[in-house]
Image: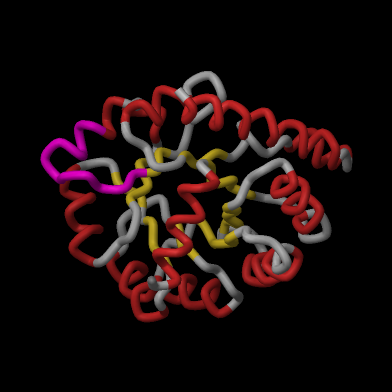
Amino acid sequence: MTRAREVSERIVESGVLAVLRGIDEDQIVPVARAIHDAGVGALEVTADGTRAAEQIAAVDRELADTDAVVGAGTVLDAPTAASVIDAGAEFVVAPDTNVEVIRTCNRHGVLSAPGVMTPTEAVTAMEAGADILKMFPAKTVGPAHIGALQGPLGDVDVIPTGGVSPDNVADYFDAGAIAVGAGSAIVDYDAITDGDMDLVRETAASFVDAVDDARSV
Protein backbone atom coordinates (compact mmCIF):
# COMPACT_ATOMS: atom_id res chain seq x y z
CA MET A 1 0.00 0.00 0.00
CA THR A 2 1.31 3.44 -0.91
CA ARG A 3 1.76 6.11 1.75
CA ALA A 4 -0.85 8.26 0.02
CA ARG A 5 -3.34 5.43 0.38
CA GLU A 6 -2.44 5.00 4.04
CA VAL A 7 -3.02 8.72 4.61
CA SER A 8 -6.36 8.51 2.81
CA GLU A 9 -7.43 5.66 5.08
CA ARG A 10 -6.37 7.63 8.14
CA ILE A 11 -8.47 10.60 7.02
CA VAL A 12 -11.44 8.30 6.52
CA GLU A 13 -10.86 6.74 9.93
CA SER A 14 -10.74 10.20 11.52
CA GLY A 15 -13.89 11.24 9.70
CA VAL A 16 -12.96 14.88 10.02
CA LEU A 17 -10.17 17.02 8.65
CA ALA A 18 -9.58 20.00 10.96
CA VAL A 19 -8.55 23.15 9.10
CA LEU A 20 -6.12 25.28 11.12
CA ARG A 21 -6.11 28.74 9.57
CA GLY A 22 -4.58 32.00 10.75
CA ILE A 23 -3.24 30.65 14.06
CA ASP A 24 -0.17 32.36 15.49
CA GLU A 25 3.06 30.44 15.31
CA ASP A 26 3.41 30.29 19.09
CA GLN A 27 -0.07 28.78 19.42
CA ILE A 28 -0.23 26.34 16.53
CA VAL A 29 1.42 23.45 18.38
CA PRO A 30 -0.76 23.50 21.54
CA VAL A 31 -3.85 24.01 19.38
CA ALA A 32 -2.94 21.04 17.19
CA ARG A 33 -2.28 18.89 20.24
CA ALA A 34 -5.61 19.86 21.83
CA ILE A 35 -7.54 19.11 18.65
CA HIS A 36 -5.80 15.79 18.21
CA ASP A 37 -6.48 14.91 21.85
CA ALA A 38 -10.16 15.55 21.07
CA GLY A 39 -10.11 12.68 18.61
CA VAL A 40 -9.18 14.35 15.32
CA GLY A 41 -6.71 12.26 13.33
CA ALA A 42 -6.14 14.59 10.36
CA LEU A 43 -5.02 18.20 10.65
CA GLU A 44 -4.60 20.70 7.83
CA VAL A 45 -2.41 23.78 8.32
CA THR A 46 -3.26 26.33 5.66
CA ALA A 47 -0.46 27.68 3.51
CA ASP A 48 -1.90 31.18 3.17
CA GLY A 49 -0.34 32.41 6.40
CA THR A 50 3.20 33.42 7.24
CA ARG A 51 5.79 30.72 7.89
CA ALA A 52 3.34 27.99 6.93
CA ALA A 53 6.10 25.48 6.21
CA GLU A 54 7.59 26.03 9.65
CA GLN A 55 4.16 25.60 11.26
CA ILE A 56 3.54 22.35 9.40
CA ALA A 57 6.95 21.04 10.46
CA ALA A 58 6.30 22.03 14.09
CA VAL A 59 2.89 20.33 14.20
CA ASP A 60 4.34 17.26 12.50
CA ARG A 61 7.04 17.01 15.17
CA GLU A 62 4.52 17.52 17.97
CA LEU A 63 2.31 14.68 16.74
CA ALA A 64 5.10 12.38 15.59
CA ASP A 65 4.33 9.96 18.44
CA THR A 66 0.70 9.61 17.34
CA ASP A 67 -1.13 8.18 14.35
CA ALA A 68 -2.22 11.65 13.20
CA VAL A 69 -1.57 12.82 9.67
CA VAL A 70 -0.60 16.45 9.10
CA GLY A 71 -0.99 18.23 5.80
CA ALA A 72 -1.29 21.60 4.11
CA GLY A 73 -4.31 23.47 2.83
CA THR A 74 -4.99 26.44 0.55
CA VAL A 75 -2.14 25.34 -1.70
CA LEU A 76 -2.60 27.33 -4.89
CA ASP A 77 0.52 26.58 -6.93
CA ALA A 78 3.18 23.95 -7.51
CA PRO A 79 6.06 25.80 -5.74
CA THR A 80 3.96 26.08 -2.59
CA ALA A 81 3.07 22.40 -2.87
CA ALA A 82 6.75 21.48 -3.10
CA SER A 83 7.56 23.70 -0.11
CA VAL A 84 4.96 22.21 2.21
CA ILE A 85 5.83 18.69 1.12
CA ASP A 86 9.47 19.39 1.99
CA ALA A 87 8.24 20.57 5.40
CA GLY A 88 6.58 17.21 6.00
CA ALA A 89 3.01 17.63 4.74
CA GLU A 90 1.49 14.22 4.11
CA PHE A 91 -1.42 15.57 2.11
CA VAL A 92 -2.10 18.71 0.11
CA VAL A 93 -5.52 20.35 -0.08
CA ALA A 94 -6.56 23.19 -2.37
CA PRO A 95 -9.72 25.22 -2.90
CA ASP A 96 -9.36 24.87 -6.67
CA THR A 97 -8.25 22.38 -9.30
CA ASN A 98 -4.65 23.05 -10.28
CA VAL A 99 -3.18 20.25 -12.37
CA GLU A 100 0.40 21.23 -11.56
CA VAL A 101 -0.26 21.02 -7.83
CA ILE A 102 -1.72 17.53 -8.31
CA ARG A 103 1.24 16.45 -10.42
CA THR A 104 3.71 17.78 -7.84
CA CYS A 105 1.98 15.70 -5.19
CA ASN A 106 2.04 12.64 -7.42
CA ARG A 107 5.78 13.00 -8.01
CA HIS A 108 6.39 13.01 -4.27
CA GLY A 109 3.88 10.29 -3.45
CA VAL A 110 1.77 12.70 -1.39
CA LEU A 111 -2.01 12.61 -1.30
CA SER A 112 -3.71 15.45 -3.20
CA ALA A 113 -7.22 16.75 -2.58
CA PRO A 114 -8.03 19.56 -5.03
CA GLY A 115 -11.17 21.63 -4.72
CA VAL A 116 -13.98 20.91 -7.17
CA MET A 117 -17.52 22.07 -7.73
CA THR A 118 -18.47 21.00 -11.24
CA PRO A 119 -18.22 17.65 -13.04
CA THR A 120 -15.67 19.22 -15.39
CA GLU A 121 -13.42 20.17 -12.49
CA ALA A 122 -13.89 16.74 -10.94
CA VAL A 123 -12.91 14.94 -14.15
CA THR A 124 -9.92 17.24 -14.66
CA ALA A 125 -8.73 16.52 -11.13
CA MET A 126 -9.25 12.77 -11.44
CA GLU A 127 -7.46 12.56 -14.78
CA ALA A 128 -4.51 14.47 -13.31
CA GLY A 129 -4.23 11.88 -10.55
CA ALA A 130 -6.06 13.41 -7.57
CA ASP A 131 -6.66 11.03 -4.68
CA ILE A 132 -9.67 12.75 -3.09
CA LEU A 133 -12.00 15.49 -4.29
CA LYS A 134 -12.67 18.38 -1.93
CA MET A 135 -16.17 19.67 -2.61
CA PHE A 136 -15.85 23.38 -1.87
CA PRO A 137 -17.62 25.46 -0.80
CA ALA A 138 -20.06 22.79 0.33
CA LYS A 139 -22.54 25.24 1.79
CA THR A 140 -23.21 26.67 -1.68
CA VAL A 141 -24.59 23.40 -3.03
CA GLY A 142 -25.37 21.24 -0.01
CA PRO A 143 -25.12 17.49 0.61
CA ALA A 144 -27.09 16.48 -2.48
CA HIS A 145 -24.27 17.73 -4.69
CA ILE A 146 -22.13 14.76 -3.65
CA GLY A 147 -24.56 12.40 -5.33
CA ALA A 148 -24.82 14.73 -8.29
CA LEU A 149 -21.08 14.35 -8.82
CA GLN A 150 -20.94 10.63 -8.09
CA GLY A 151 -23.86 9.87 -10.39
CA PRO A 152 -22.00 10.35 -13.69
CA LEU A 153 -18.47 9.90 -12.29
CA GLY A 154 -18.81 6.78 -10.19
CA ASP A 155 -17.91 6.19 -6.55
CA VAL A 156 -15.37 9.01 -6.22
CA ASP A 157 -14.06 9.96 -2.78
CA VAL A 158 -15.47 13.33 -1.73
CA ILE A 159 -14.75 15.50 1.31
CA PRO A 160 -17.17 18.42 1.61
CA THR A 161 -15.67 21.52 3.21
CA GLY A 162 -17.07 24.95 3.91
CA GLY A 163 -20.21 25.28 5.99
CA VAL A 164 -20.11 21.82 7.52
CA SER A 165 -21.29 21.89 11.15
CA PRO A 166 -22.46 19.47 13.84
CA ASP A 167 -26.01 20.29 12.78
CA ASN A 168 -25.61 19.12 9.18
CA VAL A 169 -22.68 16.70 9.28
CA ALA A 170 -24.99 13.67 9.24
CA ASP A 171 -26.54 14.86 5.97
CA TYR A 172 -23.13 14.92 4.30
CA PHE A 173 -22.23 11.41 5.44
CA ASP A 174 -25.66 10.15 4.39
CA ALA A 175 -25.01 11.66 0.95
CA GLY A 176 -21.75 9.72 0.54
CA ALA A 177 -18.92 11.82 2.02
CA ILE A 178 -15.89 9.80 3.15
CA ALA A 179 -15.01 12.53 5.68
CA VAL A 180 -15.72 16.21 6.22
CA GLY A 181 -13.49 19.25 6.45
CA ALA A 182 -14.17 21.91 9.07
CA GLY A 183 -12.56 25.13 10.19
CA SER A 184 -14.36 27.44 12.59
CA ALA A 185 -16.96 24.77 13.39
CA ILE A 186 -14.27 22.64 15.03
CA VAL A 187 -11.52 25.17 15.81
CA ASP A 188 -12.62 27.52 18.62
CA TYR A 189 -10.83 30.76 17.76
CA ASP A 190 -12.20 32.67 20.75
CA ALA A 191 -10.77 30.01 23.03
CA ILE A 192 -7.45 30.21 21.19
CA THR A 193 -7.36 33.97 21.72
CA ASP A 194 -7.96 33.38 25.44
CA GLY A 195 -5.31 30.67 25.55
CA ASP A 196 -7.90 28.16 26.78
CA MET A 197 -6.71 24.88 25.31
CA ASP A 198 -9.17 22.90 27.42
CA LEU A 199 -12.05 24.67 25.67
CA VAL A 200 -10.33 24.19 22.29
CA ARG A 201 -10.29 20.47 22.98
CA GLU A 202 -13.89 20.42 24.22
CA THR A 203 -15.18 22.24 21.14
CA ALA A 204 -13.34 19.87 18.83
CA ALA A 205 -14.58 16.88 20.82
CA SER A 206 -18.18 18.01 20.34
CA PHE A 207 -17.67 18.02 16.58
CA VAL A 208 -16.01 14.60 16.72
CA ASP A 209 -18.99 13.29 18.68
CA ALA A 210 -21.34 14.58 15.98
CA VAL A 211 -19.27 12.80 13.32
CA ASP A 212 -19.25 9.57 15.31
CA ASP A 213 -23.00 9.77 15.81
CA ALA A 214 -23.55 10.42 12.10
CA ARG A 215 -21.50 7.42 11.08
CA SER A 216 -22.99 5.05 13.63
CA VAL A 217 -26.50 5.25 12.19
Q: Quadrant of residue 190?
A: top right
Horizontal relation, residue 206 to residue 141: left or right: right
Residue 196 higher or lower than 1, as above or below? above
Along the line of sight, the residue nearer the viewer: 209 or 28: 209
Residue at point 67%, 63% (across, down): 50
Residue 126: x percent and y percent?
22, 58
Residue 140: in magenta span: no
Residue 82: x percent and y percent?
47, 77
Residue 162: x percent and y percent?
47, 36
Along the line of sight, the residue nearer the viewer: 177 or 104: 177
Q: Quadrant of residue 49?
A: bottom right
Quarter of the image containing the N terminus? bottom left
Q: How is the image coloured?
A: secondary structure
Residue 28 higher or lower than 79, as above or below? above
Magenta residues, start to end: 147-158
Residue situated furthest right in the rendering: 195
Residue 35 higher or lower than 151, as above or below? below
Total numbered labels placed on residues in the image: 0
Quarter of the image containing the C terminus? top left
Residue at point 72%, 35% (across, down): 188
Residue 196: x percent and y percent?
87, 38
Residue situated furthest top in the rendering: 167
Along the line of sight, the residue nearer the viewer: 127 or 42: 42
Horizontal relation, residue 84 to residue 38: left or right: left
Horizontal relation, residue 189 to residue 75: left or right: right
Residue at point 72%, 41% (across, down): 38
